[in-house]
Amino acid sequence: MAKEPQTPMDDELARHEQEADGAEQAAEQAAEERLMEGELEGLINDEEPLEGSVDNPEAEMLAAQVGELEQSLADAKDQALRAAAEAQNVRRRAEQEAEKARKFALEKFVKELLPVVDSLEKALETMEEGASDVHREGVSMTLKMQLDVLNKFGVESIEPHGEPFDPQVHEAMTMVPNPDLDPNTVMDVMQKGYLLNGRLVRPAMVVVSKKAD
């Protein structure tokens, strides 16, 4: 059958159908694009709570427990350090007390022995005239032996004649005007003083000069 020739009306209808088809395709494409955008937005909205999910009660509880354990560990370390420091201080004090006891255990004995030394020195002074050489030598040797023993155990004498008066180790018995000496100078030693390992056992009894009137 021969195809009927198209009229201008037919051409117009065909053109309108093509435009309608194009509009329909454009509408469908726009709808698909909007649908895809909506799905993407939904996915993004669904992911936000996952990214910021810090309000998990179990995670918060675990974090709190970790914080408590870390604080407990820090406290335990601090207590251990304090205990070690205290033990070291106690040990040091005990060592110092033991050393002090060792050094000064003879203090009372030395005090009791010093009058014997004083007596030997005075006896030697009074024997200068009218005494035999044998007697003087015997007393002198006895005194020397006594002083050597005291020195061996850390005892030393204080003989401050001509030195400035020191109230820490001297005891002023009297003050005498003396124009030839500076004030507060030891003019005479009435009794020697003694130290035991640097600690004063007995002060030296002295006569101190003062400014002449």
Image (cartoon, rainbow, N blue to C red):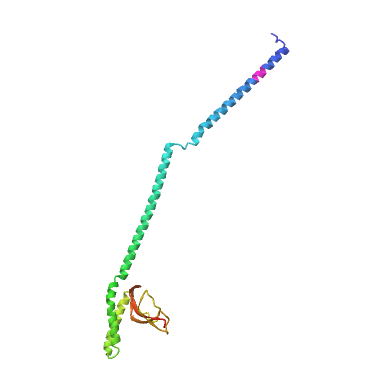
Residue that lies at the very extreme toward the top in this rendered image: 1
> What residue appears at the point 32 percent right and 65 percent down from the top-left corner?
97
Q: Nearer the viewer, residue 119 or 31?
A: 119
Position of the N terminus, as image quadrant, is top right
Horizontal and vertical percent for residue 93?
34, 63
Q: Is residue 18 left or right of residue 114?
A: right
Horizontal and vertical percent for residue 76?
38, 50
> What residue appears at the point 43 percent right and 39 percent down from the top-left corner?
60
Observer able to see residue 156: no
Q: Is residue 83 magenta?
A: no
Q: Nearer the viewer, residue 71 or 22?
A: 71
Q: Which secondary structure dominates the residues rendered in magenta?
A: helix
> What residue appears at the point 34 percent right and 65 percent down from the top-left corner?
96
Observer able to see residue 150: yes
The quadrant in which residue 112 appears is bottom left
> What residue appears at the point 26 percent right and 87 percent down from the top-left corner?
135
Residue range of the region highlighted in magenta in the rendering? 17-22
With respect to residue 111, does 129 lie above or below?
A: below
With respect to residue 12, does 72 lie above or below?
A: below
Q: Is residue 21 magenta?
A: yes
Horizontal and vertical percent for residue 49?
49, 34
Q: Nearer the viewer, residue 210 or 56?
A: 210
The quadrant in which residue 185 appears is bottom left
Q: Nearer the viewer, residue 1 or 135?
A: 135
Q: Is residue 1 left or right of residue 61?
A: right
Position of the C terminus, as image quadrant, is bottom left
Horizontal and vertical percent for residue 91?
34, 61
